[in-house]
Image (spheres, rainbow, N blue to C red):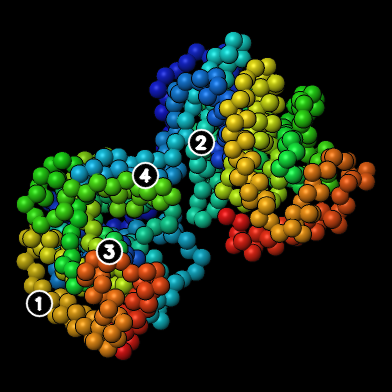
Amino acid sequence: MSQGYPVKIYKEPDLRRSSLVLGWSEDMGNLGRKATGYLNRKLKGQEFAEIEPEDFFSLGGVAIEGNLARFPESKFYACQEHELVIFQSDSPGAEWYKFLNSVLDVAEHHCRVKELYILGAMVSFSAHTTPRELLAVVNSAEMKEVLSQYDLARDMDYQTPLGERPTLNSFLLWIAQGRNIPGVSLWVPIPFYLAAMEDAQAQKKVLSFLNERLDLKIDFSDLDQEVREQNEQLAQVRSRFPQIDDYINRLESNLMLSEEENGELIKKIEDFLREGD
Amino acid sequence: MGIKLYQEPQLENPILIASWPGIGNIGIIAVDTLRGILEAEEFGEIEPWDFFYPKRVLIRKGVLEYLEFPSSKFYFKGTGGKDIIFFIGEEQPTEGERMYAEGRKAYHMANLVLDVAEKFKCRRVYTSGAAVALTHHTTKPRVWAVPNSENLIPEIRGYGNTVLMSDIEGRGGHGNITGLNGLLLGVAKKRGFEAICLMGEIPVYLQGLPLSYPKASKSVLEVLSNSLKIEVNLDKLDELDQKVERRIEEFYQQIPLEIRGQLDRLKHVTYAQPAEPGPITEEEEKRIMEDVEKFFKKRGGGG
């Protein structure tokens, strides 16, 4: 590991040829945190290292979330049986290059990581009833070839629009490319009215891919139940509020809503899912 | 994190002219225009990744092709007797939400720029930026010059259309130069380089607009080229100035009549010394500033 990197290793993991799955906590639809948390729970991930926050986060106080004080966390978990490393972290606000290299230092030098899977979500203007897609951006032709047997959209063309910046996922994928670590950045489009909430279907989509690709043998019955419950809740909103049903019907017919209608739909869905009413 | 030189040109007593973006992009437009006119050749860069967040990604058919970072490049030009090294930074290395560079990264970048200057035995550095002033956009901007050594003051006094801080109304020789265009001056002093920052005046009511201000870049370039005894054709800068001037006029006409009336009075500012009674009293100056501030607050930050 490079000298001076603020990484604390609690216990050396016993991994020979592992894969790294990485998710950010503040992702859309809470995808990164939920999906990595799910993997950790199911595969009994053991925390073995963390990145100290002081160089990377503004530490001018603490955020409060769900009545609790939150502090930035960047933690590594090892699932030895599955040769899997999970990294769950808040997105750094500074020194990104150093931070991302620290992640890959741990992955390479302590876990012998051979492949990188970065989880991400993006806004979609489709209805929640549209099946979730999984888009893949890779950092090598070999990785593209390896992934060709999976149900992924793999031919995306994209260029950062003027006035915007690339995502942290692209930055990490590029650094991994420079270090010859094959990697893929996975993107699940999430309906815009679920972006600030959770989307169990999106989690299922990305986790199913990882399950198949990494042969994790996960039983998804609990997540399937969550998907059913979320769909039922959304069906309830539709039946209770005809206007919301009309908006979603229009999205299902590939029609755009006005900005005002988008706002109303987001508010109603969020209120309902938060309060169950 | 370091310097990458593609070639090592043979340079004789070069001077360094460096600039980063700032208010109205006055300095960087001046320096980049001169670089373009002289057809200076790129010969190196500062590696960007530790300083900057990437600015563009290109993905083709699902494969990440490249990630582009803001550039920090060196150029050189032999001008027959006085060779020039240009340094042009596309962005200032800021930390967090700040607009201008400061702190560790800024200091590191300033030192890397001067490392290259030192390698080629350069002893004189120019930087350039903006001076926010109570002036009108229809008047010719002056250039405020700040040296990092007493010895340079007589030389600056010989420049045309240029003032020292002690000549500026009510400033008493004091002020600040924010960001790397200023910091480089200080680091140069620490390392024994002589350095001068040339700042073109921008009217106070234009400082928050997302517009460049080439009229002031032209003033800076006139001073710089005279100081270096280089003849430059400024037609392109004039063209750019005319285009921007039209947009500024459109903006100006949107300013409420009462405030515009106050600002119109700035057309007649004649740069009086503090001891002399100027065409605008201190009280009037204060009122103009308050009105301008009020107007920008109403517009939601002046963008």
Relative to residue A212, is residue B202 drawn left or right? right
Q: Which mark is residue A211?
A: none
**Residue A188: quarter of image:** bottom left
Q: Are marks 2 and 4 in contact (CB under 8 Å)?
A: no
Residue at 44% from the left image edge and 40% from the top image edge = B70
According to the picture, the residue beneath numbered tag 3 turns out to be A124
What residue type is disc 2 on?
Gly
- Marks 2 and 1, how far apart in space? 55 Å
Task: Quarter of the image for the N terminus of chain B: give it.
Answer: top left
What residue type is disc 4 on?
Arg
> Is the residue marked by circle 1 packed among few (<14), some (14-19), or many (20+) residues within 10 Å?
few
Q: Which mark is residue A221?
A: 1
Relative to residue B172, is residue A173 drawn left or right? left
Relative to residue A10, is residue B30 drawn left or right? right
> Is the residue marked by circle 2 packed among few (<14), some (14-19), or many (20+) residues within 10 Å?
many
Do we see residue A21 in this rendering?
Answer: yes
The correct choice, above or below, for B119 with respect to B19 in the image is: above
What residue type is disc 3 on?
Ser
What residue type is disc 1 on?
Ser
Query: In the current view of this chain or complex, which residue is farthest to the right?
Result: B276
Do we see residue A112 in this rendering?
Answer: no
Q: Chain of mark 3?
A: A
**Residue A186: quarter of image:** bottom left
Query: In the current view of this chain or complex, which residue is farthest to the top?
Result: B80
- Of tags 3 and 1, the one toward the viewer is 3
According to the picture, the residue beneath numbered tag 2 turns out to be B89
